[in-house]
C-alpha cells in the first residue's frame, strides 16, 4: 500500500483537529445556552415570587384570597407561560387560587406543595407533549401570620424551541463548516510545504558533475531557512571536496605518468637491440629507482587516506613532545653528519595525539629542513609551551621560500622547484601529510620564510596538559 503524502497527512491531521474543535465548541455552546436559559428562567421566577410574596403580605387571611384574587392575578396577567397556584396548609387538594394550567403532572404538583418551606425550592416536570416546566415553591406568610404554600410554574416551551432551532442550525452548518476547514487546511498545508518543492527541485539538479545549485533562503520560514543554509553549506563542502578530488586525481595521474613513461622508455630503448650484461644491469638499477619513487607515492597516498578517516586510528595518548622529537632527530643524525649539519632540540612539553602520526609529521619537516639546509649550518627544533598551544618550530638557514609559494606549500604535489625536488626523491606529498596529521589533532601547520635568511615551519598542538 502506497504511503500517504506528507501534505495529505498534515491536511487530514489539521482537518480532524479542526473538526473535533468545532464539535467540542458546538457542544459547549449548547450546554452554555441551556445553562443560561435555565438561569434566566429561575431568575424570572424568583423575581415574580417576590412580587407575589409582597402582595400576599397585604391579605389579612385566606378568605380574602378567595374573595379578592385580582391583586394576585394582576401579577401573572400577560405572562402566558406562568401559572400561580396557592393552597391552604390544611387543604392540599383544592387550591385557594389557580391562574393558568398549572404543572404538567398533578403528582409532581402535590409533592411540591407538601415539600414547600420557607426556603425557595425548584422542581421540574414534563407533559405528554414533551414540554418542560420548572416550578418554584415556598411558604408565604399572610397578614394574620398564616402561611400558605405558593407554587409558581413556568412553561419552558420557548426555551426548548430555541434549543431545538440551535440544534437544527448546527447540524446543517456543521458539515459545511467541516468541509471549509478541510479545504482551508489543505490550502494552508500546500502553502506551508511550498518551500519543500524548492528542496526537491535543487536535489533533482545536483550531481557530481554539477554542484553549483544552491537553495534560496529569501522569504523562507525560519525553520526551513536554517535547513536550507545547512544544505547549502553541505553542497559547498561537497563541491570543494569533488573539485579537490578531481584536482588530486589529475595531479596523481601526472605524478605517476612521469616514472611510468621513464620505465617504458628505458625498457623500449633497451629492448631495441642487444645489450651487454652491464648495460642491462644499469637499466635495471635505473628502473628500480623509478619503481621506488612510485612505491613512495603509493605509500604516502595510503597514509593520507588513513589520516582522512580518524575513526580507524588508535586512541590519542599523552606524549612527551621532546622525546619524540629526539627520536626523530636521532634517525636523521647520519644524514645530518654527511652534510655537517648540527641538529639542536630545545624545550619540552606534552601533547595529546597519536605517537606514530606525530613522529611522521616531525620526520617530514626535518627531512625537508635537511634537504634545503646548507652544509655546516644548524637546524633547530624548538618546543614552546604557550597558553593555548604547544608549538614545535623547525627552522633552517637555507635559501628561503618566496612569498607567492607559501600559501601552496601544504597542497598535494606542490613543489617550489619541480625538477630539483624530483631529482632529490621528493613525492610532493610530505607537507600535505603534515597538514592532514595536524588537522587530525585539531592543530595547525604553518610556515614563515625570509628569502636568503631563514625558513620556519610550525606545528601548533592544542594545550591539554599542564607544562612540565
Image (cartoon, helix red, strand yellow):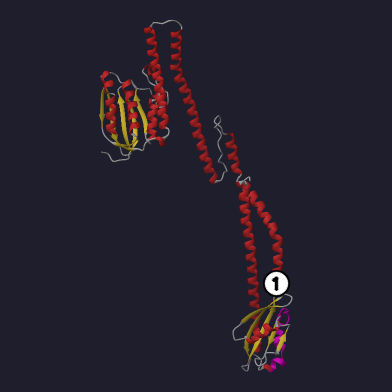
Assign the C terminus to one quadrant of the image: top left
Horizontal side of residue 78 vs 230, given as left or right = right
Q: Position of residue 82 (x, y in %)?
A: 70, 80
Q: Nearer the viewer, residue 293 or 159?
A: 293
Residue 425 higher or lower than 167, as above or below: above
Residue 347, image quadrant: top left
Dividing the picture into quadrants, the one containing residue 269 is top left
| Side of 304 where 62 appears, left or right | right
Q: How many marks on residues?
A: 1
Q: Is residue 235 left or right of residue 438?
A: right
Q: Residue at x 41, y 31 (%)?
A: 306
User: In the structure shown, which secondary structural element does the residue marked by tag 1 occupy?
Assistant: helix
Taking the magenta stretch, the answer to whether it contains residue 56 is no
Residue denoted by label 1: 160
Dominant SS in magenta: helix
Q: Position of residue 165 (x, y in %)?
A: 72, 67
Q: Position of residue 271 (x, y in %)?
A: 45, 8
Residue 220 image point, x, y percent: 57, 43
In the image, which residues are magenta? 63-82
Amino acid at each position: 500500500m502506497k504511503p500517504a503524502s506528507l501534505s495529505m497527512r498534515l491536511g487530514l491531521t489539521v482537518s480532524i483537529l479542526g473538526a473535533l474543535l468545532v464539535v467540542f465548541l458546538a457542544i459547549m455552546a449548547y450546554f452554555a445556552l441551556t445553562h443560561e436559559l435555565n438561569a434566566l428562567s429561575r431568575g424570572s421566577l424568583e423575581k415574580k415570587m417576590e412580587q407575589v410574596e409582597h402582595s400576599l403580605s397585604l391579605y389579612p387571611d385566606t378568605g380574602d384570597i378567595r374573595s379578592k384574587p385580582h391583586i394576585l392575578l394582576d401579577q401573572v396577567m400577560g405572562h402566558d407561560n406562568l401559572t400561580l397556584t396557592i393552597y391552604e396548609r390544611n387543604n392540599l387538594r383544592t387550591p385557594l387560587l389557580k391562574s393558568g394550567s398549572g404543572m404538567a403532572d398533578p403528582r409532581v404538583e402535590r409533592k411540591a406543595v407538601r415539600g414547600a418551606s420557607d426556603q425557595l425550592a425548584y422542581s421540574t416536570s414534563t407533559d405528554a407533549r414533551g414540554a418542560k416546566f420548572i416550578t418554584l415553591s415556598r411558604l408565604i406568610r399572610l397578614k394574620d401570620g398564616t402561611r400558605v404554600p405558593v407554587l409558581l410554574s413556568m412553561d419552558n416551551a420557548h426555551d426548548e424551541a430555541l434549543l431545538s432551532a440551535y440544534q437544527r442550525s448546527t447540524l446543517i452548518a456543521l458539515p459545511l463548516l467541516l468541509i471549509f476547514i478541510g479545504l482551508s487546511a489543505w490550502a494552508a498545508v500546500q502553502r506551508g510545504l511550498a518551500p519543500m518543492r524548492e528542496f526537491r527541485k535543487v536535489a533533482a539538479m545536483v550531481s557530481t558533475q554539477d554542484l553549483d545549485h544552491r537553495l534560496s533562503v529569501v522569504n523562507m520560514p525560519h525553520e526551513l531557512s536554517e535547513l536550507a543554509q545547512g544544505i547549502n553549506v553541505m553542497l559547498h563542502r561537497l563541491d570543494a571536496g569533488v573539485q579537490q578530488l578531481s584536482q588530486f586525481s589529475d595531479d596523481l595521474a601526472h605524478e605517476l605518468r612521469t616514472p611510468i613513461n621513464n620505465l617504458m622508455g628505458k625498457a623500449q630503448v633497451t629492448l631495441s637491440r642487444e645489450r651487454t650484461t652491464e648495460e642491462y644491469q644499469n637499466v635495471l638499477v635505473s628502473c628500480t629507482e623509478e619503481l621506488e619513487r612510485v612505491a613512495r607515492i603509493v605509500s604516502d597516498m595510503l597514509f593520507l587516506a588513513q589520516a582522512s578517516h580518524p575513526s580507524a586510528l588508535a586512541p590519542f595518548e599523552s606524549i612527551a613532545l621532546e622525546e619524540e622529537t629526539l627520536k626523530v632527530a636521532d634517525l636523521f643524525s647520519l644524514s645530518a653528519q654527511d652534510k655537517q649539519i648540527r641538529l639542536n632540540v630545545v624545550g619540552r612539553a606534552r601533547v595529546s595525539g597519536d605517537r606514530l602520526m606525530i613522529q611522521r609529521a616531525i620526520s617530514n619537516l626535518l627531512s625537508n629542513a635537511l634537504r634545503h639546509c646548507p652544509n655546516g649550518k644548524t637546524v633547530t627544533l624548538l618546543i614552546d609551551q604557550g597558553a593555548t598551544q604547544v608549538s614545535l618550530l623547525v627552522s633552517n638557514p637555507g635559501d628561503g621560500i618566496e612569498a607567492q609559494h607559501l600559501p601552496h606549500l601544504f597542497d598535494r604535489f606542490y613543489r617550489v622547484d619541480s625538477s630539483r625536488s624530483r631529482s632529490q626523491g621528493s613525492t610532493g606529498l610530505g607537507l600535505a601529510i603534515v597538514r592532514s596529521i595536524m588537522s587530525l589533532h585539531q592543530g595547525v601547520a604553518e610556515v614563515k620564510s625570509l628569502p636568503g635568511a631563514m625558513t620556519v615551519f610550525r606545528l601548533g598542538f592544542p594545550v591539554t596538559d599542564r607544562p612540565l
